[in-house]
Image: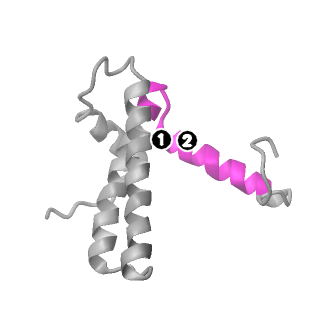
């Protein structure tokens, strides 16, 4: 396996675009959004099986398998962002800012998007 230097989200997003081969790429939000749901389901299913079959014990093999699945999730997140004309670095920063604001205002717990 090749070992690469860590990359930032924008680099990942740009590199993932080179493998985005789906119908109407660039004008098709639905395909990557549906793919994202499917990949998240795969992650959850694998975690469920660890609970069921391995008493919740995470093995090194499971970690590697899940790392691969999480990479697929990230690919689809990047594709959805690209379809929306969003930069993943900016999306990540906006999320950190939102959570820091909630924490500063004492509303990080609870529910509701506009708290």
Task: Look at mark 2 in the image and give the residue it sits on.
Answer: 91
Q: Residue at x 42, y 66 (%)?
A: 47
Kindly indicate whether the residue at mark 1 contacts the one at mark 2 (C-beta within 8 angstroms). Answer: yes
Picture quadrant of residue 49: bottom left
x and y, in percent, of residue 95 in the image: 62, 48
x and y, in percent, of residue 24 in the image: 31, 17
- Mark 1 surroundings: few (<14), some (14-19) or many (≥20) residues within 10 A: many
Q: Secondary structure at mark 1?
A: helix
Where 52 falls versus 8 (above or below)?
Answer: below
x and y, in percent, of residue 102 in the image: 78, 54
Q: Residue at x 59, y 47 (%)?
A: 93
- Mark 2 surroundings: few (<14), some (14-19) or many (≥20) residues within 10 A: few
Q: Is residue 4 visible?
A: yes
Task: Look at mark 1 in the image and give the residue it sits on.
Answer: 88
Q: Quadrant of the N terminus?
A: bottom left
Provide the residue span drawn in magenta.
79-102
User: Which residue occupies the foreground of this view, 49 or 30?
Assistant: 49
Q: Is residue 94 left or right of residue 18?
A: right
**Separation of residues labelled 2 and 1 (CA atoms):** 5 Å
Q: Which mark is residue 32?
A: none
């Amino acid at each position: 396996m090749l070992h690469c230097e860590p990359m930032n989200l924008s680099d990942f997003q740009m590199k993932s675009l080179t493998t985005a081969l789906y119908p109407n790429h660039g004008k098709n939000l639905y395909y990557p959004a549906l793919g994202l749901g499917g990949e998240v389901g795969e992650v959850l299913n694998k975690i469920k099986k660890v609970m069921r079959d391995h008493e919740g014990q995470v093995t090194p093999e499971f970690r590697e398998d899940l790392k691969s699945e999480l990479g697929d999730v990230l690919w689809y997140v990047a594709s959805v962002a690209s379809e929306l004309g969003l930069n993943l670095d900016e999306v990540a920063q906006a999320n950190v800012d939102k959570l820091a604001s909630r924490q500063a205002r004492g509303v990080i717990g609870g529910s509701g998007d506009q708290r």
